[in-house]
Amino acid sequence: MADNKDISVLIVDDNDMTRETLRVILRHDGYNVIGEALDGDAALEMATRLKPDIILLDVVMPKVSGIEALKSIRMVMQDVFVLMVTASTDQEVVSEVVKSGISGYIIKPFNAKKVLDTVGNVVGKVRANRKQKPAQT
């Protein structure tokens, strides 16, 4: 198991099974899953309050879509790393989320290796960002 306790993750997906699967995969690899949200509104509230390092954000959700939530989150948190989780391979959807400044995406159905590889790709960036920021006092 990797030592990723210092990496906080927020999971946002309207599907209970998807959230549970992501939580189990991430916690098994030592990540600190600090919250879970069911929709874009809750995602924005939790992201602002919990300040995660990484957000796993579903694209298609009721009320507020992942794309809309991403835009709102970006307004208040420019340096959070967002990985979109989607079953869509529609080029228009993929293009829109890439333009919105995501750090990667996970295509459903996924397996543990794909999730951990994708999240692992941004962990180094998270830690590098921390070193660049002056310590908060």
Image (cartoon, rainbow, N blue to C red):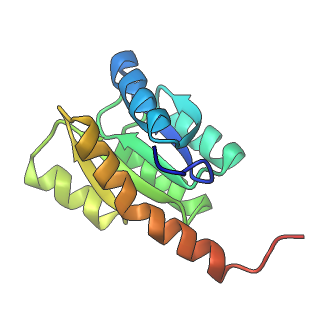
Residue 93 percent location from the top left of the image: 18, 50
Q: Is residue 117 above or below residue 78?
A: above
Residue 104 percent location from the top left of the image: 30, 58
Question: Does residue 69 appear anywhere in the picture?
Answer: no
Nearest the viewer among 32 and 90 is 32
Q: Is residue 1 left or right of residue 137?
A: left
Pick the quarter of the image with the N terminus: top left
Name the quadrant containing residue 34: top right
Residue visible at 30% across and 44% down in the picture = 115
Q: Is residue 110 above or below residue 96?
A: above
Residue extending furthest toward the top:
16
Residue visible at 59% across and 33% down in the picture = 35
Q: Is residue 117 left or right of residue 25?
A: left
Residue 5 percent location from the top left of the image: 60, 47
Pick the quarter of the image with the C terminus: bottom right
Residue visible at 28% across and 37% down in the picture = 112
Question: Does residue 91 appear anywhere in the picture?
Answer: yes
Q: How many marks?
A: 0
Residue extending furthest toward the right:
137
Name the quadrant containing residue 20: top left
Residue visible at 47% across and 71% down in the picture = 125
Residue 96 percent location from the top left of the image: 24, 58
